[in-house]
Image (cartoon, rainbow, N blue to C red):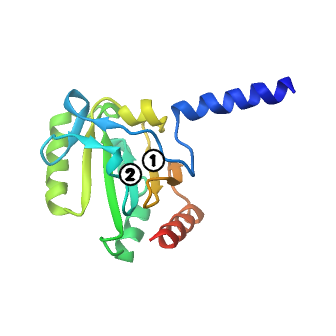
Amino acid sequence: MTYKIVLLSLLTVANLFGITVGEKPKTITIEGENGGLASDGSTWNSSTIKGKVYVLFYVDPDEKDTNSHFSQKLKAKKYDRSNYGSIAIVNLAATWKPNFIIESLLKEKQEKFPDTTYVKDKNSVLVKEWDLADDNSDILIFSKEGNLLFYKAGAMSDEDIQKALRLIEANL
């Protein structure tokens, strides 16, 4: 009996700090000195992850190509943007590259790809608040209700990609 209580307590504490597939993560705001939208620096809030199936890329700039094969598959699908959204959050604290250069590139990307929301995370907010992998490429997929459907840290395998695409299509 004591073993079950200890295990239950550990699982409860773990859920307070990280994200769990099937659940809605705690609401996070990135603003001010922590970053914000790449377009104008205004506040980004994770409560906007609802109403569509969202794919969120949380990326160390040094790992930007790690899951480019998945990005290409998503582009090829040409999902209806009224039901599908994409967010790219760049972990500026994870790189040695100067922020002003990355911020300039992000602003250009935002203009070139207006259907994707680009966000600057200057202080690894999502690493701290959602317990995402630091210095990495993280892929998260959310349902229209904002529940986490999929999470992968690091390079996605072909199996991961197929699973992710099935989840997206099943929830559109």
User: Is the C-beta separation of discs 2 and 1 under 8 Å?
Assistant: yes
- Residue ID at (27%, 32%): 122
Residue 47, position as x, y percentages in the image: 35, 47
Q: Residue furthest right?
A: 1
- Residue ID at (36%, 67%): 84
State which quadrant residue 145 falls in: bottom left
Query: Is 159 rendered above or below residue 146?
Result: below
Q: In which quarter of the image is the N terminus?
A: top right
Residue 80, position as x, y percentages in the image: 33, 75
Lateral position of residue 50 relative to residue 21, left or right: left
Q: Which of 138 and 41 is in front in this view?
A: 41
Lateral position of residue 97 relative to residue 142, left or right: left
Q: What element carries label 2?
A: strand
Q: Mark 2 points at which residue?
A: 57
Q: Mark 1 points at which residue?
A: 138
> Tag 2: Cα neighbours inside 10 Å, few (<14), some, or many (≥20)?
many
Query: Is 119 rendered above or below residue 143?
Result: above
Disc 2 marks a residue whose amino acid type is Phe
Q: What element carries label 1?
A: strand
Q: Quadrant of the C terminus?
A: bottom left
- Residue ID at (31%, 36%): 29
Residue 96, position as x, y percentages in the image: 29, 31
Q: How many marks?
A: 2
Sequence-earlier tag: 2 or 1: 2
Disc 1 marks a residue whose amino acid type is Asp
